[in-house]
Image: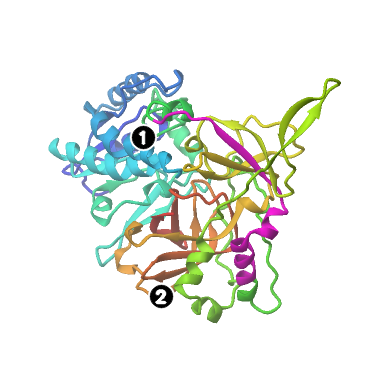
């Protein structure tokens, strides 16, 4: 066994079982380990009291450190967290985008602000309880690989890390499955052994998101508009996209145009389909112009107008006003602000009278409108192509960065726990375009698209 006693490691001890076992394993492996608990939030107004209160987490973390026999420190990073993560969240939601604060927390806090303080305590590395693996190649390039447990892989949350940050990172439980982590914790009699996994915004806790956002974003009532299927026959962009995709297909290949529903709440038993043959013709993809790609990646902007008419009602023939019937859609309710809703959202709409669930298919923060559609296979939920702005493209493997004009096949996910999806990546001066083999559900601006080669995460970008 290697002598690790001269290597000092700071474990970000959250009070959960994963970071606790990470600290325990490092101690068992002979590292000079100390724990540091970070407080990233003070304002409890929008935090639901329960499993995720930071005071309870700190208490458990301190007990874990005492049990393992390692020094314990406390650091308040709430100012940095508010500036770098929370303000980013508010700004993105205000623009009608869907941010992922956990990705930013890892890039800006755990492996930046937290790392900086840990190094002041003499740490050579920072360790966390993420389910992922790190390898260093003979050329000194660090690789970040999916965790062994496909149900818990957390590489997605680390998709914005740099080579410099990876050089200082350790992930001691990435080779383990969750049941093994629980078993180790119980055998070591760690106080966090039976603690439930945390949920909610990174280090803030279980949050009622609209309540949280209303701290800074004003509530303004607007219309909820349901979009009917006939609308898509009238939308020029939708028709063009379908015709262009059809023209790209290889001979004899057919294409599903909407997502086959599979609830992502279910525990995954696979990391997605293997990278198969592309349904689109390679020469056709290569021949797409920048304008073609921009139009393919453009989300639909619904433009529905509703005319009013007067009519007489009741025995007294009282004159009233109503909207004329529109075969493309109707106003079905009101909301408190378009910025509080995200594409693909199902809960919190308060719309009844439908045989199937109703989902948000688009938001317009300028007009303060929310557009919805009925059914898992609604055309407005599905898209094939997305774009990442040039300045938003991030390569973990900088040695593999694509040059303008390059085309590659990778597997991609656009949200945590989504099975990996086969896709073609096209790099152009105007950005990186990702053309999926199958339609994707609920692509939303502000999300991170993350691409993989086999089990290695190579890079990411903001949609």
For numbered disc 1, what is the local secondary structure? helix
User: What residue is drawn where x is 61% and y is 67%?
Assistant: 240
Q: Quadrant of the C terminus?
A: bottom left
Q: Tell me where residue 287 appears, x and y as whole percent.
A: 50, 80
- Find disc 2 in the rendering and name its residue: 406
Between marks 1 and 2 in the image, the one whose residue lies nearer the viewer: 2
- Horizontally, is 350 left or right of 41 in the view? right
Secondary structure under badge 2? loop
Instruction: Sort mark 2 into few (<14), some (14-19) or many (20+) by Cα contacts within 10 Å.
Output: few
Q: Residues within 10 Å of mark 1 (few under 14, many from 20)?
A: many
- Nearer-N-terminus badge (1/2): 1
Residue identified by numbered label 1:
19
Residue furthest to the right in view is 315
Where residue 432 sits: x, y (%)? 41, 65
Can residue 423 be spotted in the picture?
no
Residue 328, how many percent across, how many down?
70, 49
Is residue 3 visible in the rendered image? The answer is yes
* Inter-mark Cα distance, 1 to 2: 40 Å
In which quadrant of the rendered view does residue 187 lie? top left
**Is-magenta flag for residue 316?**
no
Mark on residue 350? none
Q: Residue at x 47, y 25 (%)?
A: 194
Is 218 contained in the magenta span?
A: yes
Image spot of residue 59 (x, y percent): 33, 19
Q: Nearer the viewer, residue 418 or 93?
A: 93
Image side of residue 411 versus residue 132, left or right? right
- Magenta range is 217-245
**462 or 93, nearer to the observer:** 93
């Amino acid at each position: 066994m290697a002598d690790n006693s001269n290597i000092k490691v700071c474990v970000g001890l959250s009070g959960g079982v994963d970071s606790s076992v990470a600290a325990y394993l490092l101690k068992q492996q002979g590292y000079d380990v100390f724990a540091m608990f970070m407080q990233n939030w003070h304002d409890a107004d929008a935090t639901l009291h329960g499993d995720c209160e930071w005071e309870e987490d700190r208490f458990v973390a301190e007990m874990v450190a005492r049990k393992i026999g390692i020094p314990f420190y406390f650091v308040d990073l709430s100012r940095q967290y508010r500036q770098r993560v929370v303000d980013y969240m508010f700004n993105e939601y205000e623009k009608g985008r869907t941010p992922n604060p956990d990705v930013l927390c890892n890039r800006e806090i755990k492996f930046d602000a937290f790392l900086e303080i840990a190094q002041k305590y003499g740490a050579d590395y920072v360790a966390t309880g993420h389910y992922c693996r790190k390898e260093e190649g003979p050329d000194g390039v660090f690789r970040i690989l999916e965790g062994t447990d496909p149900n818990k892989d957390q590489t997605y949350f680390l998709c914005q890390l740099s080579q410099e940050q990876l050089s200082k990172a350790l992930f001691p439980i990435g080779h383990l499955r969750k049941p093994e982590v629980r078993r180790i914790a119980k055998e070591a009699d760690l106080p966090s052994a039976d603690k439930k996994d945390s949920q909610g915004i990174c280090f803030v806790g279980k949050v009622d998101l609209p309540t949280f956002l209303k701290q800074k974003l004003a509530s303004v009532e607007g219309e909820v508009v349901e979009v009917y299927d006939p609308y898509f026959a009238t939308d020029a962009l939708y028709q063009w996209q379908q015709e262009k995709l059809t023209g790209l297909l290889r001979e004899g290949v057919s294409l599903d145009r909407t997502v086959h529903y599979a609830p992502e709440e279910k525990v995954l038993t696979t990391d997605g389909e293997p990278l198969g043959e592309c349904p689109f013709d390679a020469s056709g993809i290569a021949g797409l112009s920048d304008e073609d790609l921009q139009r393919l990646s453009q989300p639909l902007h619904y433009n529905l107008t509703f005319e009013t008419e007067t009519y007489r009602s009741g025995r007294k023939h009282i004159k009233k006003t109503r909207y004329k019937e529109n075969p493309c859609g109707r106003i079905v309710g009101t909301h408190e602000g378009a910025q509080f809703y995200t594409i693909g959202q199902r809960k919190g709409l308060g719309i009844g009278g439908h045989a199937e669930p109703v989902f948000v298919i688009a938001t317009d923060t300028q007009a303060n409108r929310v557009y919805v559609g009925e059914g898992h296979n609604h055309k407005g939920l599905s898209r094939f192509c997305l774009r990442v702005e040039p300045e938003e493209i991030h390569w973990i493997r900088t040695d593999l960065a694509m040059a303008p004009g390059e085309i590659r096949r990778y597997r991609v996910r656009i949200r945590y726990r989504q099975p990996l999806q086969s896709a073609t990546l096209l790099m152009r001066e105007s950005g990186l375009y990702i053309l999926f083999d199958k339609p994707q559900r609920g692509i939303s601006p502000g999300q991170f698209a993350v691409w993989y080669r086999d089990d290695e995460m190579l890079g990411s970008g903001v949609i």
